[in-house]
Amino acid sequence: MSDPEIIEQLKQGSELAFKKLVETHQKLVVNTCFGLVHNREDAEDIAQDVFIEVYRNIQKFRADSKLSTWLYRIAVNRSLNHIRDNKKNRWFHSFEDEVSAKNKQLQQLESSNSDQPEFELENKQRATILYEAINELPKNQKVAFTLSKYEELSYQEIAEVMELSVSSVESLLFRAKKALQKKLYKCYQKKCM
């Protein structure tokens, strides 16, 4: 079933079309959300909200853009709202979560049969540092960077999702990369990796 067929059937209230929509685009939506919120459970919850919003608002979809572009846009907006709404709660839980995450990492490393557990731990630490650096980027830079690097969208597709010009996307990505280089270099100098 093609996207236009799914859209038409959704407009008629077809549950089968909704199921097909979710099957076809679930990975895209969850990965987009995960790229922004960096938590699998939250990303899956947000993805559910995205699909519910699509189902409720399918009559408003004018097909000016592709269905996937609309899904990206909703997923990005929902993820950013989630980040904003949970920022206060995160301050209270972040220390406890960080300790718990580090303990899980150490337990996994101890139980793994790897010949180089320190290498795995170092890679996980680097990933954590990178996620933290990405989270510190301004909102539009973070969105553009995530869509580019995690979702591998073209500049044109990112421009459609963010409702910007391609040159604006290029500028956002350039500034995001420079900011990340600067933050990660400072971290490297302080030997936090």
Image (cartoon, rainbow, N blue to C red):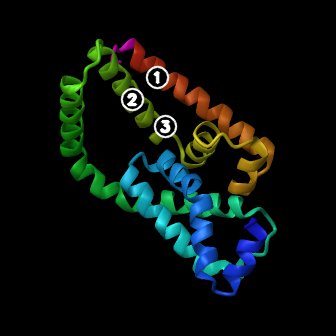
Q: Quadrant of the C terminus?
A: top left
Q: Quadrant of the N terminus?
A: bottom right
- Residue 180, can we see it? yes
Q: Main secondary structure of the magenta part?
A: loop
Task: Name the residue type under label 2.
Answer: Ile
Residue at coordinates 46% horizontally, 22% vertically from top-left? 184
| Residue underneath mark 2 | 129
- Distance (Cα) linking label 1 and label 3: 10 Å
Task: Name the residue type under label 3.
Answer: Ile
Q: Is residue 44 left or right of residue 107?
A: right
Q: Which mark is residue 134?
A: 3
Q: Is residue 8 left or right of residue 178?
A: right
Residue at coordinates 39% horizontally, 29% vertically from top-left? 129
Q: Earlier in the sequence, mark 1 or mark 2?
A: 2
- Distance (Cα) linking label 1 and label 2: 8 Å
Q: Are marks 1 and 2 in contact (CB under 8 Å)?
A: yes
Secondary-structure class at tag 2: helix
Label 1 Cα neighbours within 10 Å, binned few <14 / some 14-19 / many ≥20: some
Residue 84, percent from left and from top: 43, 58
| Residue underneath mark 1 | 184
Residue 138, percent from left and from top: 54, 44
